[in-house]
Image (cartoon, rainbow, N blue to C red):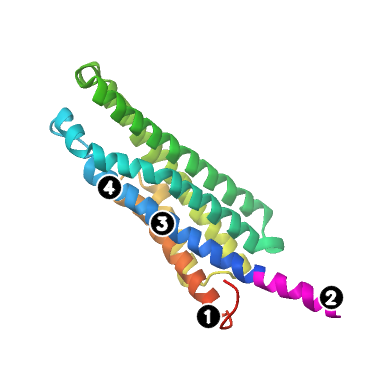
Amino acid sequence: MEQKMQQSGPLTREQLKTPRAAAIAGILFSVLLAATLVLLHISAPAIPPKMQEWSAASEGTVVLALNLVPFAGIAFLWFIGVMRDRLGAYEDRFFATVFFGSGILFLAMFFAATAVAGALILVLNAAPKLMIESGAYAFGRAITAQIMNVFAIKMAGVFMVSTATLAMRTQVLPRWITLPGYALAALLLLSSRFADWLPLVFPLWVLILSTYILIENLRGTKPGAAA
């Protein structure tokens, strides 16, 4: 009996840690992704009036945004891992596969898009005239836009749908979070033309979801419990 009580103590603490870890990782990911998207949007207009002047004036901001991406990716992977651990035995295999696969695909395409953007900055600084006159700069920006604004955003929508479905089936989240998740995901999936601020829908929803999990976990924690 005493051995069971000793085992239940650490298990209870681990159960309390898991949702809190998911919430913190989700919040970090949301903040970093939103900051990256905003910085890139204000520093890299769709049609810069003068390519060389834009590069010189905005390079620092763009580099800062690109350097945030790996940390956002780490937080997102951590969020996926602890969410799956939180669901545990209640995890639906079908939706769990879609959840995991869409999250990895989103992250891979997001990394690919930012890698292309970073390469464009490096080459543009080294040979600006050649890049612009050859059309390589415009081509690179088109590739970046296609990867991020079409494919990565669609995978973000699939991730939102699968997350909302798993949350509803396991009752981890209330309907006032999951139902708007479906609506926002449909907006990402069905939008035929990319809107400038549309990608912010994804980190905003993850932020709301993560904040709710963190608040609920703190409410259920006894004073002095292990963090």
- In the rendered image, residue 132, in percent from the top left (x then y), is placed at 21, 21
Q: Earlier in the sequence, mark 2 or mark 1?
A: 2
Locate residue 143 relative to residue 14 in the image: left or right: left
Residue 225 location (% of width, % of height): 60, 78
The range drawn in magenta is: 1-13
Residue under the image location 35 percent in, 53 percent down: 34
Which label sits on residue 206? Answer: none
Q: Residue at x 59, y 49 (%)?
A: 100
Mark 4 vs 3, N-terminal side? 3
Would you say residue 63 is visible in this rendering? yes
- Residue at 52% x, 76% y: name it: 218
Mark seen at residue 30: 3
Residues under numbered marks 1 and 3 in contact, where contact means CB atoms less than 8 Å apart: no
* Label 4 sits on residue: 39
Q: Horizontal placement of 97 versus 154: left or right?
A: right
In depth, the one of 202 and 216 nearer the eye is: 216
**Against 112, is 20 above or below?**
below
- The residues bearing labels 2 and 1 have C-alpha atoms spaced at a distance of 28 Å
Label 1, on which residue? 219
State the separation of the CA atoms marked 4 and 3: 14 Å
Q: Main secondary structure of the magenta part?
A: helix
Categorize mark 3 by other alpha carbons within 10 Å: few (<14), some (14-19), many (20+). many
- Nearest to viewer (mark 3 / mark 2): 2
Q: Are marks 2 and 4 in contact (CB under 8 Å)?
A: no
